Image (tube, grey):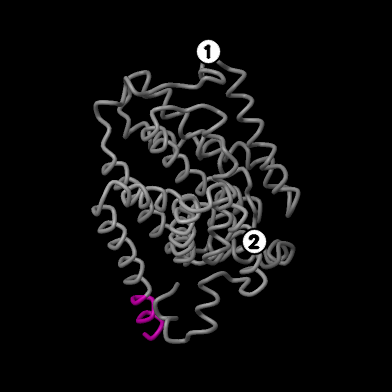
Amino acid sequence: MRILFIKNYAYISIIGIYVILILVSMISPYTLEIVYYTLLLMILAQSLNIIMGFAGLYNFGHAAFVGIGAYTFAILVVKGVDPYLSMIIGGLVASFTAFLLGLVVLRLKGPFFAISTLGILEAIRYFIIGTPKITGGAAGFTLFKYLGTSYNPYILVYILLILSVVTTIFLIILSHSSLGYSLKALREDHDAAEASGVNTTRCKIIAFILSAFFPGVAGGVIAFKTFWVMPETIFDISYSIEAILTVLLGGSGTIIGPIIGAMIYNISKSLFMSYFPGFQLIVFGILTIIIILIAPEGVIGLLNNRFKKVRRFLI
């Protein structure tokens, strides 16, 4: 009963964060932009948390799923498909790609997997550049004439909000499922998990597929907002790096960690970009190293260890 009571407080705190974001988005166009990028980073970090936080695998190619979703969205929109349906299809295509890639790369462990994901990101980007008849090549797609009349920044922000809420609910369900327990087991000790009967390759492939869907949908939202997709910008490794930093900052393997991490990171990044443009990634790289040394479990772990009264609000 006490555990359920504590979790109810944690769920209320998550709802409170989303309510605050909605209210802040209504203040001005500037705050709307901050909320947009905060929610985008939340989704990337939450989805990465499935494979990184639960399974313990660092995916530096997470940006590839953003790009696949964006290009699927662009190709479908040019062909006259409804843009909102195209976003969902982009997520499904990203998941299918993750399935194909996972059959190979998820047999690798530790740093070998991380390095292979970097290679995948670059390979997909060069494939896009080398197929101009399908993908537009290096020039990409310009989408303004297909989407300009239906563009509404508030709708895009609320799509990201809904997607983040769905991701949060999914993570809560996953953390209490047999798959979630299996992923946590292989994160702690891969060989021991296999010895106890966990099909580690199967679990990792499923986690990889699930983690690809949400950034795939988000890629469509990015394409809708910018009206332009090209390989150099949409397959940007900074999406992966910032998602990893956010997970580490908030608390890897927790539900609320990526949410808190995204808020801290993006709000602070906005301030740094205003006063020290170009140095924000350096500052946050140093900050992440400090957090790993002082609080390896992130901000959530630090709060749990130092302040007992706030534990009930964290999950």
Return the x and y of residue 308 as percentages of the image width and height.
Answer: 47, 86
Q: Residue at x 24, y 54 (%)?
A: 27
Q: Which mark is residue 286?
A: 2
What main secondary structure does the magenta stretch of the protein show? helix
Return the x and y of residue 164 as percentages of the image width and height.
Answer: 38, 53
In the image, taking residue 86 as reference, residue 116 lies left or right, namely right
* Magenta residues, start to end: 1-9
Disc 1 marks a residue whose amino acid type is: Lys
- Is residue 42 visible in the rendered image? The answer is yes
Viewer-nearest residue: 265 or 43: 265
Viewer-nearest residue: 91 or 224: 224
Q: Is residue 3 magenta?
A: yes
Element type where label 2 sits in the image? helix
Q: Residue at x 63, y 47 (%)?
A: 60
- Is residue 199 visible in the rendered image? The answer is no
Disc 2 marks a residue whose amino acid type is: Ile
Q: Residue at x 60, y 36 (%)?
A: 100
Q: Considering the image in quadrants, where does the N terminus appear?
A: bottom left
Would you identify the image quadrant in which residue 203 lies?
bottom right
Q: Is residue 261 magenta?
A: no
